[in-house]
Image (cartoon, rainbow, N blue to C red):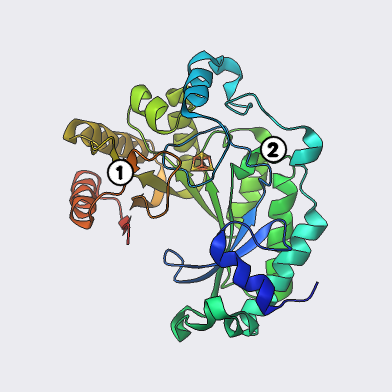
Amino acid sequence: MSFNEKTLAATQFHPSWFEGYRYVYPVVSRRAGGVSLGVNLSPTKLCNFRCVYCQVQRDETRDEIERAVATTDPERASSLDVLRKTPAADACRVDLDVLEAELSRLASATLDGSLFRVKRFAEVEPSKRVLRDFAFSGDGEPTLAPQFPDAVSRLIDLRKKLNDDGIKLVLITNATRLTRPEIVDALDRFDAANGEIWTKLDASDPERFKTVNRAAIPFDAILKNVAFAAKRWRIKIQTALFLLRGQAPTAEEFARYCEQIREILAIGGRLESVQLYTIARVPAESDAEPLANEAMDDYAATLRRETGVPVEVFYSR
Ligand code: SF4
């Protein structure tokens, strides 16, 4: 398939889908400060969380999600989709040859500048016309894909072929599978290739975790996984802060959150930074709304003061 304007223009209507492409999509990212090529290993939208702020449109109702979270056996939840609608293995299968071809084509288009001849990208300022990263992100949890370890190898090898160490490798994960042997092995290789692991930690107690991330997995398991990852690799923590039914995280909740970060540091966890962000796109649930910039700045100042960790802030706009 040739790289053409019509194909690229379609991306503006769906950021994690790209007409004619199955797995890879380009975005000009504020976070990356240039072009990020998203690698979506979840074409079936498979995820074991149902975050209230998730922008991926799925077809379950709020009641179905809450019932599933309340009744799923936590012992089995870490390896299951929360609604037990885990698609057949074939549907989840990622064709790595197709993925690599798409990534290679879009990387070349970014590097040779043809990406910026299409309407959607024509206004991108010169300083942002840079290929910043290949990022495992998209419509679900990347580490649930059986091909995740092999996909890691493909990204590392492609970057080598492009001979461009300036392209970062990023994994955005919800932390649920960070201690599984095959994932640990893949992430050892990812880390050795300077890949960055960005892991979600939105809550500071089991109740808020159930309300915000809507997962049946025990909150303790998430905390342990994040601590394990921070000790083994250098990681970034991503935390979503927002109004839920008009209520911002309380001072007590945020104090507990700061305490969690201090505990991770105290056991030798290496945190490159904590990214505090609020809702920037239309979320799954309408009662989740963005926080004002000033409120985000206040949380960031508290976190810096209480933990000394570097904090990055991403506003709604
Ligand atoms: S972990 Fe990511 S993909 Fe899964 S529900 Fe949460 S925001 Fe959506």
Q: Residue at x 51, y 29 (%)?
A: 61
The residue that mark 1 highlights is 242
Q: Mark on residue 110? A: none
115 sits to left or right of 300: right
**Number of residue marks:** 2
Q: Residue at x 54, y 17 (%)?
A: 74
Q: Nearer the viewer, residue 221 or 39?
A: 39
x and y percent of residue 278 in the render? 33, 50
Q: Amino acid at mark 1?
A: Phe
* Ligand 1 within 8 angstroms of badge 2 C-beta: no
SS class of the residue under badge 1?
A: loop
How far apart marks 2 and 1 lie (CA) works out to 34 Å
The residue that mark 2 highlights is 182
* Ligand 1 within 8 angstroms of badge 1 C-beta: no
x and y percent of residue 236 in the render? 43, 50
Q: Earlier in the sequence, mark 2 or mark 1?
A: 2
